[in-house]
Image (tube, grey):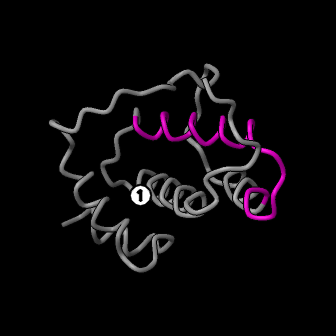
Amino acid sequence: MKPMRKVFALNYIRETVCCYEGLVNCYYGGLKVDEGELRWEFDVLTKYFKVTHSHKLIDEMEERFDIIKHLKYDEPPNNIPYIRDLENRPSHMTNYWNWRNSEDQCDGLKMKRYLMK
């Protein structure tokens, strides 16, 4: 197996953290968001920040990730890897992908509009 790079995913770590933050905000705003998916995203981002080395963008996104009001989990991260079921994707995920491809992924109100369609 090829060793992991010390710095990676710079092209999409901002989008990933913003998407996670938006989904958490939607969850606390009363919209239907899959808690298992939130847990998986939390685990992936937690591991990412643990294994990557310092970089201006990574450090900025880690700070942003740290202030998100995460759901409370009693056990350490354990949902990696995750096998994705594309055949039975929930309808809110279709709206999420539409939102993700919009201009401003960090706009929580825009995300709510997409999820409520």
Q: Classify residue 49 by image quadrant.
A: top right
Where is residue 50, by image quadrant? top right
Residue positioned most to the front = 2
What residue appears at the point 23 percent right and 64 percent down from the top-left corner?
116
The span shown in magenta is: 37-59
Please provide percent x and percent y for residue 91.
18, 50
Question: Mark 1 = which residue?
Answer: 26
Q: Residues within 10 Å of mark 1 (few under 14, many from 20)?
A: some
- The rendered magenta stretch, by its main secondary structure, is classed as helix
Quadrant where the C terminus is found in the figure: bottom left
Magenta stretch holds residue 80: no
What secondary structure is found at the residue carrying circle 1?
helix
Q: Is residue 74 left or right of residue 96?
A: right
Q: How many marks?
A: 1
**Is residue 74 or residue 81 the one in the foreground?**
81
User: Is 43 one of the magenta-colored residues?
Assistant: yes
Where is residue 101 shown, x and y percent of the image? 35, 70
Identify residue type, mark 1.
Cys
In the image, 63 versus 81, the foreground residue is 81
Extreme residue toward the bottom, this view: 103
Q: Position of residue 62 (x, y in %)?
A: 73, 53
Residue sitting at the far right: 54
Query: Could you tell me which quadrant the N terminus lies in?
Result: top right
Q: Nearer the viewer, residue 11 or 111?
A: 11
Q: Nearer the viewer, residue 113 or 100?
A: 100
Kindly identify the residue that appears in the image at 30 percent across and 49 percent down.
Answer: 32
Instruction: Write the residue at 68% across / 35% down.
Output: 4
Q: Quadrant of residue 13?
A: bottom right
Residue at horizontal 50 percent and vertical 41 percent from the top: 41
From the viewer's perspective, is residue 112 above or below residue 35?
A: below
Residue 109 x/y as whole percent: 41, 74
